[in-house]
Amino acid sequence: MAQQKLVLGFDIGGTKIGIGLGSGEGKILAKGRIENVNTYPEDVLPQLVSTAQRLAGEAGVKLGDVAAFGISAPFPADPVNGIMTAPTNNKHWRNVPILQYLKDNLKMDGCFENDANCGALAEWFFGAGRGCTDMIYLTMSTGIGGGIIASGRLVRGNGKTLSAGELGHICVELDGRQCNCGMKGCYEAYSGGRALAQRMQEELKDKPDSMIMQLVNGKVEDIDMVPLEKAVRAGDAYACALWDEMSRRNAQAFGIYINTFNPQKLVLGTLAWAVGDLYTDPIKKYLPQFCWKEPMEACEIVSSELRRDIGYYAGVAAALNHLQEQGK
Ligand SMILES: [Zn+2]
């Protein structure tokens, strides 16, 4: 991979934009952030350029020495043209051509990737997936995003949509639970943090005596994965049954990925490292029901190594991957 290169990474989050100046070895040389809540793109875009200039100054390099930038963006977006179409958390950003803007104003090459693909690249280059040729990264957060590295390359899909790796939206149940994406029966509708929170709020709203309702002092809107985990650890029957169902769905989805891609590693984000063995052990227990023994034994299920810092590595890794794919 590209060594000694300098690259910029822009991590577009729901409430902030993290900007990192990094090297090919994965050192973040300087970093900054811009608050992005309820702001207009014409206010924010120039700040991206000025922050990039400032970071170069802090690191003692010239912006002209930076080889490329990478944008890690949430979906929905248009990755083919590098446009942020309609980010969920910022109503003022509609059809913002961020890739072209930064190319024109930073005067360097750049790329635009969805944030889960960038997470996969970051773990592949600098985290738990180092040295793998085949690995899958799953965000395991409020939603379930995925990124696939197969035969030493990021799998993007065909150039009309570049939408490969939507691993949270494989249908695992006929006429199943409604997913936020509009489909029914998606894996995310069973195991995503937001979907589980919505389900518990619905099922427990009239059950003030349930352990989870007591843990949130009766505030049904506060029910999320945190009280669920506490109730599971305390042995609450409802919580344990839901956890078991979530774990079987996780195993079902992972079995599909393992038989399809034969990865060396499945690298899991937020919930896996926040919860620990209670999260991963039941998945490993159920996995033999959902895939063949040989590829299962050849695949390690591990937690993200970059954890909270993954955002700063995400855009940097995308930029390095972009250079590598061009043979630079
Ligand atoms: Zn879905």
Image: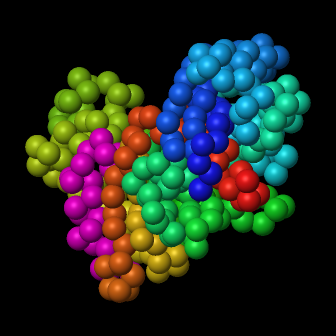
Can residue 9 be seen in the rendering of this structure? yes
Image side of residue 104 versus residue 263, left or right: right
Q: Quadrant of residue 87?
A: top right
Residue at (60, 43) in percent of width and height: 4
Image side of residue 295 versus residue 20, left or right: left
Which of the pair 115/242 is nearer the observer?
115
Magenta-colored span: 271-291
Can residue 51 be seen in the rendering of this structure? no
Q: Is residue 61 magenta?
A: no
Residue at (62, 19) in percent of width and height: 60
Image side of residue 307 versus residue 283, left or right: right
The percent coordinates of residue 188 (x first, y second) are 49, 55
Depicted 15 relative to depicted 130: above or below: above
Which of the pair 189/88 is nearer the observer?
88
Q: Is residue 285 magenta?
A: yes
Depicted 112 relative to depicted 105: above or below: below
The percent coordinates of residue 51 (x first, y second) are 68, 17
Q: Quadrant of residue 65?
A: top right
Residue at (50, 69) in percent of width and height: 134
Which of the pair 7/276 is nearer the observer?
7
Magenta region, mostly helix, strand or loop?
Answer: helix
